[in-house]
Amino acid sequence: MPTKRDYYEVLGIPKNATDEEIKRAFRKLAFKYHPDHNRDDNAGERFKEVNEAYEALSDPDKRAAYDRFGHGGAEGFFGRGFEGFDFSGFGDIFDAFFSGAATTTRQAPQRGADLHYNTTITFEEAAFGCENEINILRTENCSLCQGTGCKPGSQPTRCPNCNGTGQVRRVQQSIFGRFTNITTCPRCHGEGRIITEPCPQCRGTGKEKRQCSLSVKIPAGVANESQIRLRGEGQAGTRGGPSGDVYITLVVEQHEFFTRDGDNILYELPINFAQAALGAEVEVPTLDGKTKLKLPAGSQTGKVFRLKNKGIPHLHRRGRGDQLVTLLVVTPDSLTAKQRQLFHELADTLGPAKGLPKG
């Protein structure tokens, strides 16, 4: 069985310490080693040791027995030593120290919650911008009582439980001294006032759900999953606080044949063997309508042509990206008898391929 340390050593005080010095040392160490405050593995044992020492030295008779007979006298005096010590009165004290109610004040105005919505737009709308409308369901101040929660013509009254402070104070006396525990008033929930005649429309809540339509201006050049914020269009605040915001996430539909790479547009242009070999002037679709593109003779699959300023407008600044047109030479999968004969004749004149010319 481990040897107990000297109680004076445990509390860090001299043997002639006064009652006030004993109490002061105990408060300091109990606070330091309380398990709610100190997560060290040995804190619990040290806390018990400190309390056992204080039990022995804080009582004049027990202290005298300990000074005369040591721990043996203490065991005889206490019966079961530390196990006989009653800590039942310490709960509220340490709750106040470590996990008790913090000092509260009457509740302040609170901002309303934000709302989040998705809206779908076309590829062209994302490129050039548009104005859409969305329908949302939100909490607003009651239209009858204007958010007061009171029946029109009436006023809230001061809470008799906390006298309008929103707080309830409770004073506790303990070995640590006098503590004032301040909590939110349970009757008015910190408001400091109560509604005696509630509004018949909102039943005293001061709020009501309402469907509303909002206009959303979408700038040119937005991308998929971009967000737009509408300030002050969210849920209504409480106690006079401001409303929240509405965040709208844009979902851009895929285009039939365009894809987007940053502010550039990618397009694959299918052409036939004759156009690739002889060259041609072809029409290419763009966001601004069709435009003509001249293909040089001997054009190969994969060759890229750049159409300047035919891409996506830059977001919040001037200028546009480009449209990149990639050639795709299409091999016919069915031929007429005449076409087959002509290809055989062409094959005889061309001979075996010697490699691709540089594009």
Image (tube, rainbow, N blue to C red):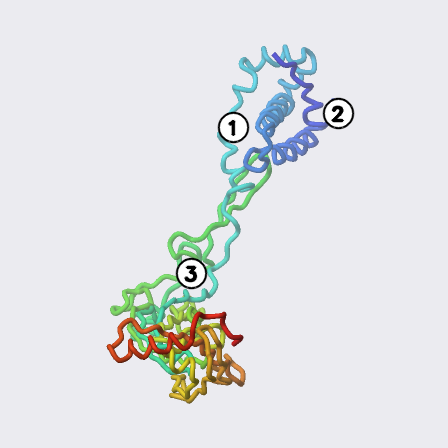
Image position of 1 with respect to 131: above or below:
above
Left or right placement of residue 31 versus residue 106 in this view: right
Q: Which residue is mark 1?
A: 87
Q: Could you say whether the residue bearing mark 3 is in a helix, strand or loop?
A: loop
Q: CA distance from mark 2 to mark 3?
A: 52 Å
Return the mark for residue 191: 3
Q: Could you say whether the residue bearing mark 1 is in a helix, strand or loop?
A: loop
| Residue 181, x across and y down, in percent | 51, 46
Do callouts 1 and 2 mark residues in contact (Cβ within 8 Å)? no
Q: Amino acid at mark 1?
A: Phe
Image position of 316 with respect to 155: above or below:
below
Left or right placement of residue 157 versus residue 261 in this view: left
Return the mark for residue 221: none
Image position of 268 with respect to 158: above or below:
below
Closest to the observer, 158 or 186: 186
Do callouts 3 and 1 mark residues in contact (Cβ within 8 Å)? no
Residue 277 figure quarter: bottom left
Q: CA distance from mark 1 to mark 2?
A: 26 Å
Q: Amino acid at mark 3?
A: Glu
Q: Which residue is mark 2?
A: 14
Image position of 85 with respect to 187: above or below:
above
Q: Could you say whether the residue bearing mark 2 is in a helix, strand or loop?
A: loop
**Residue farthest to the front, as pictured:** 348
Precedes in sequence: disc 1 or disc 2: 2
User: Dot 2, crowdedness within 10 Å: few (<14), some or many (≥20)?
Assistant: few
Q: Amino acid at mark 2?
A: Pro
User: Dot 1, crowdedness within 10 Å: few (<14), some or many (≥20)?
Assistant: few
